[in-house]
Amino acid sequence: MAQERAVSPGALALDELSGWPEELCRRELPSVLPRLLSMCQHSDNWIEHIQILKVIVKMFLPHVDHLTLEQTFFSQVLPKTVKLFDEMINDLTSQAKELSSQNLEIQTTLRNILQIMVQVLGALTGCVQHVCASQESIILENIHSLPFSVLHVIKSTFVHCKNSESVYSGRLHLVSDLLQALFKEAYSLQKQLMELLDMVHMDPSADENDDILSMVVVIHSLLDICSVISSMDHAFHANTWKFIIKQSLKHQSVLKSQLKHKDIITSLCDDILFSFHSCLQLAEQMTQADTQDNTDYRLFQKTLKLCRFFANSLLHYTKEFLPFLSDSCCTLHQLYLQIHSKFPPSLYATRILKAQQEEIAGAFLVTLDPLISQLLTFQPFVQAVLDSKLDLPCELQLPQCLLLVVVMDKLPSLPEDVQTLWCTENQSSEATTRTPLLKAMFYSFEQCSGELSLPVHLRGVSTKGQAEVAVTLYQHVCVHLCTFIATFHPSLFPELDAALLNAVLSANMITSLLAMDAWCFLARYGTAELCAHHVTILAHLIKSCPGECYQLINLSILLRRLFFFMAPSHQVEFIQKFSPKEVENLRLWQYISFQALSAELKRQTAEEVATVGTAQCREWLSSSHTLGDLESLNTVLSSLLALCHSAGEALDVRQQTAIMEAGSQLWPFLNIKQVVTLQTSLLKFEPPDHVRLAMLDFLSTLGKLFIPQAIQDKILPNLSCIFALLLSERNWLIEQHALEAFTLFAEGTNHEDIVPQCISSEETKNKVVCFLEKTGFIDETEVAKVERVKQEKVLFWERFAKVTTEESKWPPSQPYAQRAHPELLLEEEYRFFSREAAL
């Protein structure tokens, strides 16, 4: 009877089919299965469809030849199953807003839909389990529709569960049990699917076929699922990523040119940042609570472990697919910067305990080091890091500087061609220009003004028997820069020379100082001939400077420092080449310390400078005293002053007398009345800062000078007027120098009556009192200090960017003197650079 009912042409009774024995199902498969498939395809009733699907999977699927599964079953049924599943999701979403504890009809309807969805997932799990059990090695072509249908349903399920808070709003509790069951069923289905996919075999010799493209789609579908479940189940999220990486590497030979590597790298970097920020938030909570709760700490460790897993996954993937990651290098670069921007010593770091800092550094940050090592040889990464158009926000400027330091540490162990790639400019044929490493290093260092002024500290290097000592950012960069210079490849010396010289000529004082320190190291570490060569170049540059400028000041300081490192024989050659006997060379000797010379050389050179200098003074006195001759006279006097400061003891009495006589004869030409009156008039025209600073230097020396009674009435009122004007300055730099100059004058002068006249206003009087008593400074907490420096740094770089934009509009051929002269620094910016020194 059962056989007769089974093969009869009437309607199939699903309940009866469910009771058929296995042998009967196998025998009647050819006649029953097509009818069941037709019923399934034409049924739009969800309940009927799932009942038919369950019967097919349970009773007849085990008897279908595995080679015909796709044509016989999966391609026939699963598209309709997916369509109906999407309809159920849409119905849930649209009717959920009507759900309430009072509306039992809607509540029942929604719960029924959820139960049917759970059954659909169960049926699909049965399909996947059957394939896994029936085959040892799977060809995707034979089950093509199954993985895509399953992945679609899984993703839709997870998206619905993730959005359940908003979909069901405050009525979630009415369906939460079924949503939980739905999530668990989808979770189980995905695990089964990943087992199936792990059994897939792909021909390594195949260039491109449907199986390869299908596997690519599968991997990227799992990637989409990762983005959905990242905040739902961390362990499941990590396992899904592990599977993606595993399959990508397993089939690397056939998938490498087909995978969308940029999408994978971007998603992995996003997950690294998300887990890292979560880790920092947990650490911050423990810091704020001031106690270490075991539950919080275990969660912190679990999240940190997740960070390390993602970072190692990225490291592994990058290593295997590096040639295909050209368009991912900017993402990898930004990942490094973003991570370090949230971790000490960054001003923008989350405030966490030292213990947690060390745990994060030891478990997670260490993985970034081998990542950079892998990327160093990859030209697109070099381009991303050294892009001349790289415009980083304030919080990423220090991480960029630290990254370049890491690069400098690693380059010496790499081949010459890699070092050349980093240390030279790119060819003009390339679309974007690349800044050489050292030039980028100095520019990046210059951008860290806030971190340098605070200053931030980094972990130092411990020496034998001594504890590790924290070092400032300046010390950190300087030490690593000098180490890099010591290992610089000889073929790249021209780039080194150019980078150091450009940095020395920088308008930024701290950048110039760093370059000078590095140059001095090079002079001591390199050969004596190299040092002598550099000193000669500097001498020629100084002689060629057209006039007073900050570049001349920087070059002269470097010349003075390097001269101490010259070998005595090279000093002799320098003296012969730039003999003090020739007037035009006195411009050099005003910057050289005679202390750098041996006793005999010092005596000989001092005598020559004194002889030529005094002769020039006498020549000027006997001439017509034109204004044009003053510049050369000032140079002569500067060289004589340098001589007296550093080698006065080397002069005999005759030479000392000659210098004194020349000075005495020049003194009458310096009319103090005229000078003071001129300064009073000049202040009315708002002269540049350097003029006002020169005035203050002059005024500070007048305290020791007694002014004759005959001219007091003409000088003292002007003197008090000058001090009053300069003390009332709003420019903080001028204000500080004015306070210092006035203090020196007031302490030394015999004309006490003038002192109160200089501080006639109440505001100026309070300012002077605060300066003398060292009061008026704000007692900041460390947190407040960091916040202030961050705000000032933003202010400075906004202003700097504006000025740079304005300067770029000036014609290159236009003389500097004719160009507009914007005020480079605002008052707040002066305070930014100077306040720390004052404190």
Image (spheres, grey):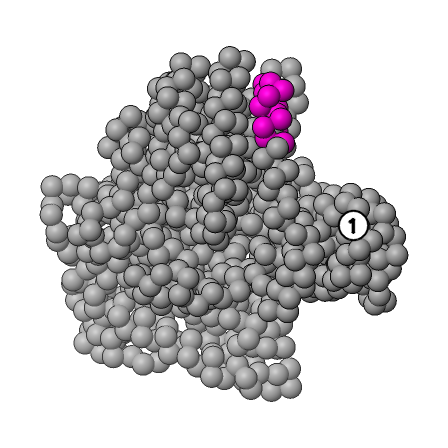
Q: Is residue 588 left or right of residue 173?
A: left
Across and down, in percent, residue 49 comes to 33, 74
Q: Tell me which residue sits at (71%, 43%) in the image.
A: 294
What secondary structure is found at the residue carrying circle 1? loop
Q: Nearer the viewer, residue 322 or 238?
A: 322
Crowd tier of the residue under label 1, counting other residues whose Cα lies within 10 Å: few below 14, some 14–19, many 20 or above: some
- The residues colored magenta run 645-660
Q: Is residue 306 left or right of residue 745?
A: left
Across and down, in percent, residue 260 comes to 27, 55
The residue identified by callout 1 is: 707
Q: Main secondary structure of the magenta part?
A: helix
411 relative to 392, above or below: above
Q: Tell me which residue sits at (47%, 30%) in the image.
A: 612
Q: Nearer the viewer, residue 161 or 189?
A: 161
Q: Nearer the viewer, residue 50 or 354?
A: 354
Q: Residue 809 lies in what quarter of the image?
A: bottom left
Q: Is residue 721 visible?
A: yes
Across and down, in percent, residue 825 comes to 56, 61
